[in-house]
Amino acid sequence: SRNPASVRELIPLMRAALPAEAVFASPSAADALTKAHAGRMFGRLMYFFYWGRRRLAHENIRKAGGMPRDPVEIDRLVRRVFEHLGLTGIETFLIQRIVARGVFDHHVTLENREILDDAMRGGRGAIMVCAHVGNWELSGLAMARRYKITSIARTIENPWIEPGSGAREGNHM
């Protein structure tokens, strides 16, 4: 099998991995589990079809210090990374639907907001630096819904992803 040439070829796979749209309209725990399952399934599809990226992930883990050395453990880690990417992809794909249905705050929680609120008192502002960990598109949107923020980010060069994500809504870029 060959690698898909582009994200455009993955969109039908994403749609196949998504359960009924109604699942994403509700904030219930059962529906969140279904979304998580769909995301993991999409990640497994990416793991299977993107063998070149899978091989690169294996090589990078072997080169990195402090990472597993056993090939079985490396493969287990790479599978989990792809599953996480699948979940992040599903969440990003659904951002606009979640916001439009008014259930965004049921899906995303900002922890330790009081630290930022304390720093912002007095109108001086704050500088935040975040790592590219977890679904940072969702966390950026959650921040923009509560605070006036300016973000620095590289433009995504793939037209199949950037316009529809809705993740940069409310941000000055």
Image: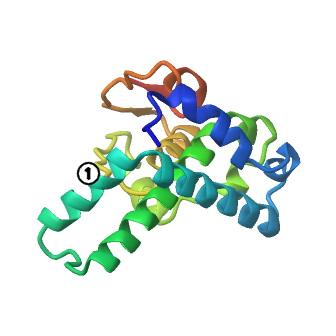
Instruction: Judge left or right: residue 12 versus residue 111.
Output: right
| The one of 164 and 130 positioned closer to us in this rendering | 164
Instruction: Judge left or right: residue 88 versus residue 79.
Output: right
Q: In x, y percent, where is residue 104? A: 70, 48
| The one of 110 and 78 positioned closer to us in this rendering | 78
Q: In x, y percent, where is residue 58? A: 27, 61
Residue holding disc 1: 56
Q: Is residue 3 visible?
A: yes
Q: Residue 98, located in which quarter of the rendered image? A: top right
Q: In x, y percent, where is residue 45? A: 56, 52
Q: In x, y percent, where is residue 82? A: 45, 57
Q: How is the image coloured?
A: rainbow
Q: Please count the marks in the image.
A: 1
Q: Amino acid at mark 1?
A: Leu
Quarter of the image where the C terminus is located: top left
Q: Is residue 166 visible?
A: no
Identify the residue at image location x=71%, y=57%: 35
Is 157 rendered above or below residue 104?
above
Identify the residue at image location x=19%, y=78%: 69
Is 49 rendered above or below residue 173?
below
